[in-house]
Image (tube, grey):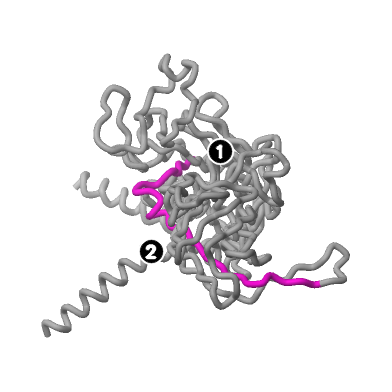
Amino acid sequence: MEELRKSMLVALILAVTCSVAVAYDPLDPTGNITIKWDIQSWTPDGYVAMVAMNNYQQYRQIMAPGWTLGWSWAKKEVIWSIVGAQATEQGDCSKFKGGIPHCCKHTPSVVDLLPGVPYNQQIANCCRGGVISAYGQDPAGSLSAFQVSVGLAGTTNKTVKLPKNFTLMGPGLGYTCGPATIVPSTVYWSADHRRKTQALMTWTVTCTYSQQLASRYPTCCVSFSSFYNSTIVPCAKCACGCGAHKSMGGRGGKSHSDGCIMGDSKRALTPGVNTPKKDGAQLLQCTNHMCPIRVHWHVKLNYKDYWRAKIAVTNFNYRMNYTQWTLVAQHPNLNNVTEVFSFQYKPLLPYGNINDTGMFYGLKLYNDLLMEAGPFGNVQSEVLMRKDDRTFTFSQGWAFPRKIYFNGDECKMPPPDSYPYLPNSAPLVTPRSVITAASACLLVLLLQVA
């Protein structure tokens, strides 16, 4: 019995560990970032490889300051040169007498180059400051690449040792990478599509995202309102963790925030308040929920065959703007969207014909940039949906979304019992009920006379 108890405890620990390490997003079950290494040529002491990072996530991008890719060499490899990226540290290269490698560290960390670098340092799909778009929003911008020349390595398919212990910061925590796996070599077509070539060797690494690894608290919250009820359901108190934010003058302990300031205070208007910090510390507007982002869903109008909802996204972070933001909503009536005003809209079909999830994002050069907290720190739109007589109702909170994601992170929803409710309707009056009530009143009068 004791051995059985121990084995069950070990199984439970393994289950919990695996659930944290392996990420799964029910609204994007196949989403991941795949890193592919293609060896293009052999060198006297190693190889030249093209490294490509493909973001196959439908609505989760990597924002500025961008990605950082790390790994451990299997032997004593060095990086002679990189085109389209750079290692953050050179390491100890003192044993080299002639040419000095670009990086001699056993665990290099590589970052993308910034836009505008000289052309001789660029390569296709590089140099965007590490920013990678979501595949569902911008497929052309969902790829980042660089070329690396590796030395002191194997020079054949049999002697090359794959790098290991891959890490991906995007830009913070959240990604877990699996081991490198050899796959069939990548095939390339010539410009005229008349000749086909292939990489000398190819391996891939798959990285998946977990919101629980990225942050202890949610990063956004949701509030509700409707035309049929004057109640406004706010974000839950401390939805994003009040303990993680200290008001200015009361800082202490470890925190991912520099506190909060009142929106109408003088400090909110001082120069430099919007300057990001190197450590990424937030500066939030003091609110009841203490979330950087609030999404408000308002049931606005009811027509005979249609109904309309308004969506507003507000930024409460003074040090962060969101370029190419995405908003994902899950609602049963998104299967019949008639028109979306001032946002782009794309249905997401993670499970084939179940069309209840959609992605909203800004119009390019119009509202695809959500500014820092302040008078311009919000974007909003309206969505018109056609009613389905079999399912449509305003009762029991049906008109409100089941889930909301902002930039790939699930937002904290209000408790279901707080949703705006329909006003109580008067009971239906029938002739029989009128007669019954009259008989009761007559009986009371007769008793009083007696």
Residue 399: numbered disc? none
SS at mark 2 in the image: helix
Q: Is residue 434 above or below residue 285?
A: below
418 displayed left or right of 63: left
Q: Position of residue 113 (x, y in %)?
A: 60, 43
Q: Position of residue 14 (x, y in %)?
A: 29, 72
Residue 21: numbered disc? 2
Label 1 to label 2: alpha-carbon separation: 27 Å
Residue pointed to by mark 1: 322
| Amino acid bearing label 1 | Tyr
Q: Quadrant of the N terminus?
A: bottom left
Q: Residue at x 47, y 39 (%)?
A: 294
Residue 431 appearing in the image: no
Quadrant of res 289: top left
Mark 2 nearby-residue class (10 Å; few <14, some 14–19, many ≥20): some
Of 4 and 169, the residue lying toward us: 169
Q: Give the mark toward the camera: 1 or 2.
A: 2
Residue extent of the magenta highlight: 196-225
| Amino acid bearing label 2 | Ala
Q: Residue at x 33, y 40 (%)?
A: 238
Q: Is residue 357 above or below residue 426?
A: below
SS at mark 1 in the image: strand
Of 432 and 175, the residue lying toward us: 175
Q: Residue at x 42, y 14 (%)?
A: 266
Q: Position of residue 239 (x, y in %)?
A: 36, 43
Which secondary structure dominates the residues rendered in magenta?
Answer: strand
N-term mark: 1 or 2:
2
Q: Residue at x 73, y 42 (%)?
A: 119
18 displayed left or right of 48: left
Residue 32 counted in the magenta span = no
Of 171 and 371, the residue lying toward us: 171
